[in-house]
Image (cartoon, rainbow, N blue to C red):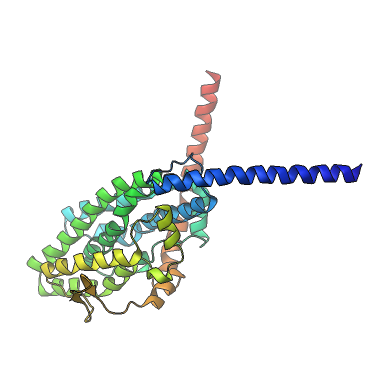
Amino acid sequence: MYTQALDSRDTADVASKTLRSTDEMALQQRFDERIDAGDFIEAKDWMPENYRKTLTRQISQHAHSEIVGMLPEGNWIGRAPTLKRKSILLAKVQDEGGHGLYLYAAAETLGQSRDQLIDALHSGRAKYSSIFNYPTLSWADIGVIGWLVDGAAIMNQVPICRCSFAPYARAMVRICREESFHQRQGYDALLTMMTRGTEAQQAMVQDAVNRWWWPSIQMFGPPDDQSPNSAQSMRWGIKRISNDELRAKFIDATVDQAKLLGVALPDPELKWNESRGHHDHGAIDWSEFWRVVGGDGPCNRERLAARVKAWDDGAWVREAALAHARKQATQARAA
């Protein structure tokens, strides 16, 4: 009897797995057809598990970067040179907090809670952009972050407005509009210092450019042949343009902007290559990039500690909000 029951169970299991496998193959084929057709995938649509995991990693990393990115600039709100600059910087930092919220909401549609996403950041399992592990030593750094860092972000993020995952693409439309404001305000601040500032202020701008140039071009990620996720992300339509292509476009655009500013980019090998239609540039120190990504940058520990402290200090607000929501729900049921 036991043997008969065991045989029956095995037969049922095989049939179930075969059916499930057949159904999944049909779903996979339909998903691939939609990707090839350029359709958007919504949160409730079927998707391969690896597609879901890749999106969760990328969107949450993007959200973490926006939130951690508030720290180096927030440090200068109280020290901005004029009321105008203070109000602009305050608005920018507020925008970045909003970007983080949009992106966390998009990531949550993939099945992980906000608490899980943030816990992954605080425990070191999730990463954020390496650029935010560098210190802001002068007011010129704030302008350079706007010009170079936000400029690189726009170059990287505009193609994501056509990402195959619809909630991410929709969030990016507004984010890119606001990032363009951030880039313009940074460039305007630098232009003011370079055209109307003292020699000391102009030297301060050049010093900031020297320190931020190489980290900014590392923001596009490692070379295509060293990027383990790029090929699959491009196949799925999550990524539309490769790391190296984006980096080349950014460098080309920035060279002309630097000439208008009157600053020198710290790369003696930077020159136009007519045959390539792009600028050649010097070797990028990828060992530094991976060192900072791995947690050994100038401000890694400081920035992560600040985020953990802010989360812990805000626990009472979250608890109060949940208690209020429970009270409202109880009253609604009783009514």
**Whole-percent x, y for residue 78 in the image:** 26, 58
Q: Horizontally, is 286 left or right of 144 in the view?
A: right
Vertical order, 204 against 151 (above or below): below
**Whole-percent x, y for residue 226 in the image:** 42, 71
Name which residue lies at 29% across and 63% down: 246
Name which residue lies at 42% across and 60% down: 306
Vertical order, 315 against 266 (above or below): above
Nearer to the camera, 70 or 177: 177
Nearer to the camera, 284 or 117: 284
Nearer to the camera, 165 or 286: 165
Residue pushed farthest top? 335
Residue 312 seen in this snapshot: no
The number of discs equals 0
Quarter of image, res 234? bottom left
Q: Horizontally, is 267 left or right of 26 in the view?
A: left
Name which residue lies at 49% across and 33% down: 324
Residue pushed farthest bottom? 268
Name which residue lies at 27% across and 59% down: 155
**Whole-percent x, y for residue 40 in the image:** 39, 43
**Whole-percent x, y for residue 194 in the image:** 11, 68
Residue pushed farthest left? 196
Nearer to the camera, 92 or 309: 92
Vertical order, 203 against 37 (above or below): below
Residue 68 seen in this snapshot: yes
Q: Quadrant of the N terminus?
A: top right
